[in-house]
Amino acid sequence: MRSMYYSLVCLGLITSVLAPTPAAAQSARLKALVVDGQNNHDWKKTTPLIKATLEGCGRFTVSVATTPAKSEDMASFQPKFSDYDVVVSNYNGAPWSESTMTAFADYVRNGGGFVSVHAADNSFPQWADYNRMIGVGGWGGRNEKSGPYVRWRDGKFTRDTEPGRGGSHGKRHPFEVVVRDAKHPITAGLPSHWMQAEDELYAQLRGPAESMQVLATAMSSRESGGTGEHEPILMAIQFGKGRVFHTTLGHDVKAMSGVAFQVTLQRGAEWVATGSVTLPAVPAEELTKDTPAMRDPLKLVSTSVNFDSMPDTSASGWQSLFDGQQLKGWSQKNGTATYKVEEKCVVGRTSEGSPNSFLCTEKNYSDFELAFEVKVDDALNSGVQIRSRSTEEFNKGRVHGPQVEIETGGTAGYVYSEGTGRGWISKQQPKTEVFKKGQWNTYVIRASGARIQTWVNGQKIEDLVDEESFRTGFIGLQVHGIPKDKGPYEVRWREIKIREL
Ligand code: ZN
């Protein structure tokens, strides 16, 4: 904070204001259920990738429902579909029980979201509602009786009723996908052409194709053993009140490592669940045209942020910033307060007449979760700088940037813009009693993009979006300045650790 005296005056004035609101909080995560258990594809390997792809964009929490194995009794498979915003099928196997099939069709008909991935469109050839949901399908005896082929010819889609099998593919290869409906929420904002990783290019699918929009096609080339036709690759289908996204992509791990598969799956799942897509559009640099963009979906999960809950400080990935022995990796900036190590704590002690002092990490951190414990003398104001800077050009090295407040008067955990003249970043600072005087207090801070969240002793204090502050910088432990005849006062930190996002 700027000055103890000013803040004490303020505290007297601010007694009851509205509770802090999570400004621009990301909407709660959508619930997805992946269905698997039988498939002529390696579902045990691919379901975790579907889960990681959906969770990795931060929009979904994913559960998995696995059917009994082939030739086992299906009666026990009765997921409660209505508990989910979207059901994703990675299933190609024996029919479910009558009641489960009815429950699933009712779920979609009444507004539930459904995503059919790759060979899920091979499944259930005899189930009329299912064929309506997926629009077109392949194999399983599908033929002209199942419905037409849907073909892109002369710049438009036509229904081709000629006799013939339903479902084929040439040899696996990377291929170009062409958007045919750039206005649909799933494809809006995406490049018009992109390359999918090596995958099976499904061809000759046929089915009722009612209320179905083909969003993208790909040329099934003769050289690859294909049909020489542009085949439907991504489809959006309306079934009753429900929405269906049908992707023929995703044969195996390699195919699911394609950014094209991942991005369209994420967007398709969000669309079927909500009717719109809030996930950011992916530019051509990311969804590339000449060579397929690849990324390991399992790595998406480790960087995903669940803004709905406090960071789990017992999870993996945390690194200690202070070993309890020495101040390696830290250096002091501004002022003459002293910092030393005592009893495995960093102890900051005031120095009469000194301006604010900071013990700062030598390293900069951008998106991270930070945790520490702190104990402070009642009379001392302190705080922890995040994403802060000190440069000769700005006020002769004055440390400046967001500071998470540490003090005993009721504003602990709010965010102040130290050294910039801007004042509080927290729009309101309704007093709390969460900070314990004369005792250790735990702080957990999350900074991700423009969003900053803080918790003190497990209670959420702040959740704000601040576009103005730096997105990267050092972490700094503040000892506030005191006048000549005051002090000395102390503040202690321990268990300082960080997890970079
Ligand atoms: Zn396949």
Image (spheres, rainbow, N blue to C red):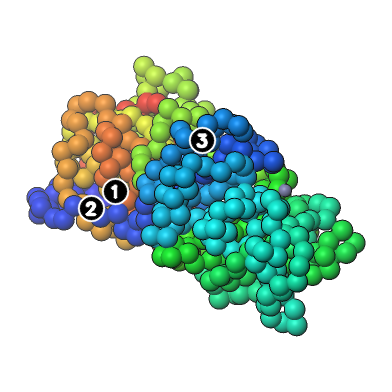
Q: Which residue is drawn at 61% across and 38% down?
A: 38
SS type, badge 1: strand
Q: Which mark is residue 74?
A: 3
Q: Which mark is residue 462?
A: 1
Relative depth, front residue between 213 and 12: 213
Q: Which residue lies furthest to the bottom in this view?
A: 154
Q: Which residue is drawn at 37% across and 31% down?
A: 372
Q: Nearer the viewer, mark 1 or mark 3?
A: 3
Relative depth, front residue between 27 and 209: 209
Which comes sooner in the sequence, label 1 or label 2?
Answer: 2
- Kindly report the distance in space between the C-alpha atoms of the residues bearing marks 3 and 2: 50 Å
SS type, badge 2: loop
The kind of residue on which mark 3 rests is: Met
Direction from residue 490 to residue 261 in the image, left or right = right
Q: Quadrant of residue 154?
A: bottom right
Q: Which mark is residue 20?
A: 2
Q: Residue 290 in the image: x percent, y percent?
A: 79, 63
Q: In this view, does 247 lie above or below 490?
A: below
- Kindly report the distance in space between the C-alpha atoms of the residues bearing marks 1 and 2: 7 Å
The kind of residue on which mark 1 rests is: Glu
